[in-house]
Image (cartoon, helix red, strand yellow):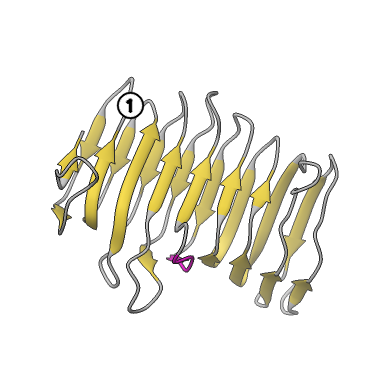
Amino acid sequence: ATAGDITLESTVDGGHSLTVSAGNGTVDLLANIGAGTDLASITVSGSTINLQDVTTTGVQSYTGAITTNSTYTSSGSSITFDGDLIVADQTNGLVVDTGAGGGDIVFTGTIDSEATENNDITLTAGTGNIDFDNTVGATDSIGDLLINSAEDVTADSTLEVNSFTQDSGSGTTTLSDNLTALGSNASGDAVDI
């Protein structure tokens, strides 16, 4: 499709794959997806995408300018945010969890908090990799960036956060540009790897 907005106002459940393609239009997922029964997978594309909670057993892929409002969970499968991303949930921030298996977490675009906010990011990739391809917090800084688990963590550009904590990693953490930590985490350290 070349244009056309798509809005899903109710929950979507069931062990099937869901594809939502709005072309140059907007996708608004206003209710939780897979909250009752996990979806098999989800693929969403549009000029702008507004998301709530999404739970799948398989892969999740979002392509467009993305606003997140909650938690994205899979069972060992990759979750990819392909486009600039705004973290808009002031309570929980952005939570992405691919489980203990090998699901990667990939961000191809910039990541910022909603304007004037300072929202957290919590990532759990198990034995999967985490990849930041662009700046994090360059326009509106991120609060606490917590990585619970991953194999390799790669940041290709600047990270501007309140604190950066990596609890576990079985591979290599590569920071290719500046890491600016403006505050401290629960242990009192601004950076804890």
User: Quick one: 23 or 50, which is closer to the camera?
Assistant: 50
Q: Is residue 86 magenta?
A: yes
Question: Which residue is at 79% across, 71% downward?
Answer: 9
Q: How many marks?
A: 1
As drawn, which residue projects farthest toward the top? Answer: 170
Above-or-below relation of 79 to 172: below
Question: Which residue is at 67% across, 58% downward?
Answer: 44
Above-or-below relation of 135 to 139: above
Question: Which residue is at 65% across, 76% downward?
Answer: 24
**What secondary structure is found at the residue carrying circle 1?**
loop
The quadrant the N terminus occupies is bottom right
The image shows residue 90 at horizontal and vertical percentages of 44, 66
- Do we see residue 14 in this rendering? yes
Q: Is residue 185 left or right of residue 103?
A: left
Q: Quadrant of residue 74?
A: top right
- Do we see residue 23 in this rendering? no
The image shows residue 186 at horizontal and vertical percentages of 24, 44
User: Quick one: 18 or 142, which is closer to the camera?
Assistant: 142
Question: Which residue is at 43% across, 42% downward?
Answer: 123
Above-or-below relation of 1 to 12: below
The image shows residue 127 at horizontal and vertical percentages of 46, 23
Identify the residue under disc 1: 168
How many residues crowd mark 1 within 10 Å: few (<14), some (14–19), many (20+)?
some
Residues drawn in magenta? 85-90
Q: Is residue 180 magenta?
A: no
